[in-house]
Amino acid sequence: MYLRKAHFNDLPAILAIIEEARATLKQHDINQWQAEEPSQSQFENEIRQELCIVLIIEGQIVGVASIVETEDAGYEAITNGQWQTVDSLYYSIHRVALTSRLHGQHLASQFMTLLITAASLRGAKDLRIDTHPDNLTMQHVIQKAGFTYCGDILIANDPSPKRYAYQMILK
């Protein structure tokens, strides 16, 4: 099991994983990723910028996420709490998804640990992530990885914009 930067020829596998995740969320009545995002153009841009990461097991792409090194507009206005620190530079993890073929194998926690390590190796000291209030599975994965709940944020252009925001300070 390892991570690597995504390549353009990975797009079909990435998009298939996203569609599986979208269907799973819908099946559990979680109104996350039910609109247009995440989109193919988002992944194309993030692959071009070398921000998109894939998880490989036995030679197959089984997971995808993006580690973004720029400010996230959605993180500017936090309610019901505050960030632990407000450094001008932070990294954020977005669009985390695993293939449904491997559900139940506890890979999400391992994947999250690898993503945190990858962000740290890029120089991250302040790491942020968010998820939908109804996505209890992802909330568990995030908290188990050591992130602290900091408050609520709103995501632009989303029919269900509220997200729980988390932060981890790396030493």
Image (spheres, rainbow, N blue to C red):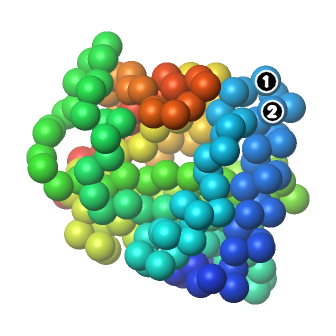
Q: Is residue 111 above or below residue 85?
A: below
Q: Position of residue 105 (x, y in %)?
A: 78, 54
Quadrant for the N terminus, please: bottom right
Residue 143 in sight = no
Between 55 and 23, which is closer to the camera in this rendering?
23
**Of 99 and 31, which appears nearest the observer?**
31
Residue linked to disc 2: 26
Going by the numbered disc 1, the residue's amino acid type is Asp
Q: Is residue 166 visible?
A: yes
User: Height in image: 48 above or below 131?
Assistant: below
- Residue at image coords 29%, 73%: 122
Q: Tag 2: residue type?
A: Lys
Which residue is painted at 14% across and 39% down in the image? 86
Residue 16 point in image, percent of width and height: 80, 63
Q: Residues within 10 Å of mark 2 (few under 14, many from 20)?
A: some
Which image quarter: residue 22? top right
Q: Residues within 10 Å of mark 1 (few under 14, many from 20)?
A: few
Find residue 146 and name its label. Answer: none
Residue corresponding to mark 1: 29
Residue depicted at x 59% and y 64%: 41
The image quarter in which residue 15 lies: bottom right
Q: Residue at x 31, y 74 (%)?
A: 121
Left or right relative to 127: residue 37: right
Q: Residue most toward the top? A: 80
Residue 109 placement, left or right of 21:
left
Q: Are marks 1 and 2 in contact (CB under 8 Å)?
A: yes
User: For residue 17, what is the image quadrant?
Assistant: bottom right
